[in-house]
Image (cartoon, rainbow, N blue to C red):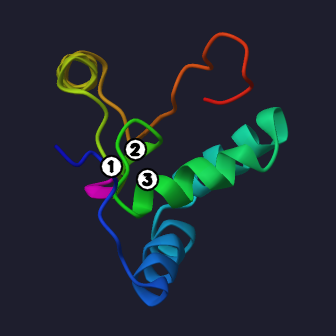
Amino acid sequence: MDTSAPSIDKATEAQRLADIKDRMPDTYEAIQRKAGEIGKQAFNLVRRAVRGEPDCFYAIERGRVAGTPFCQAVMAEVAVQMVEFGCTYLCIWPVKDGGDGKA
């Protein structure tokens, strides 16, 4: 089974990134904060997610969605928390793994 992310063209990727910046201001600020914590890897995770790679980055802001969902168990828990607490935006980042410096 092929588990690689679907391929998209550079124009589509650029448009998806522009949509985050232009239409998801809270999400864009969260990405910038994350980059302040972990460096350019944050932007790499967002790019991978907008290309369709799961478990890298996922955001919801006022009805807009960016990135690719995480595994089903994570997304089910997120849905419960969103209903219980309500939110105007949500960003999901991977947990850093054990030692190779990759998320």
Can you tell which of label 2 and label 3 is closer to the viewer? 3
| Dominant secondary structure of the residues highlighted in magenta in the image | strand
Q: Are marks 1 and 2 in contact (CB under 8 Å)?
A: yes
- Residue at image location 39% in from the left, 35% down from the top: 55
Q: Please tell me how crowded label 1 is: few (under 14), some (14-19), or many (20+) other residues with Cα within 10 Å.
A: many
Say which quarter of the image contains residue 76: top left
Residue 62 in the image, given as x and y percentages of width and height: 32, 53
Q: Quadrant of the C terminus?
A: top right
* Secondary structure type for disc 3: helix
Q: Are marks 2 and 3 in contact (CB under 8 Å)?
A: yes
In the image, residue 24 sits, relative to residue 62, either above or below, namely: below
Count every numbered label the image shows and give the total.
3
Residues at marks 1 and 2, CA–CA distance in whole angstroms = 5 Å
Say if residue 61 shows up in the picture: yes
**C-alpha distance separating marks 2 and 3:** 7 Å
32 with respect to 1 (left or right): right
**Element type at mark 2:** strand
Whether residue 100 sits left or right of residue 45 in the image: it is right
Q: Which residue is mark 3?
A: 49
Q: In the image, what residue type sits under mark 1?
A: Thr
Mark closer to the chain start, 2 or 3: 3
Q: Which mark is residue 58?
A: 2
Chain part drawn in magenta: 61-65
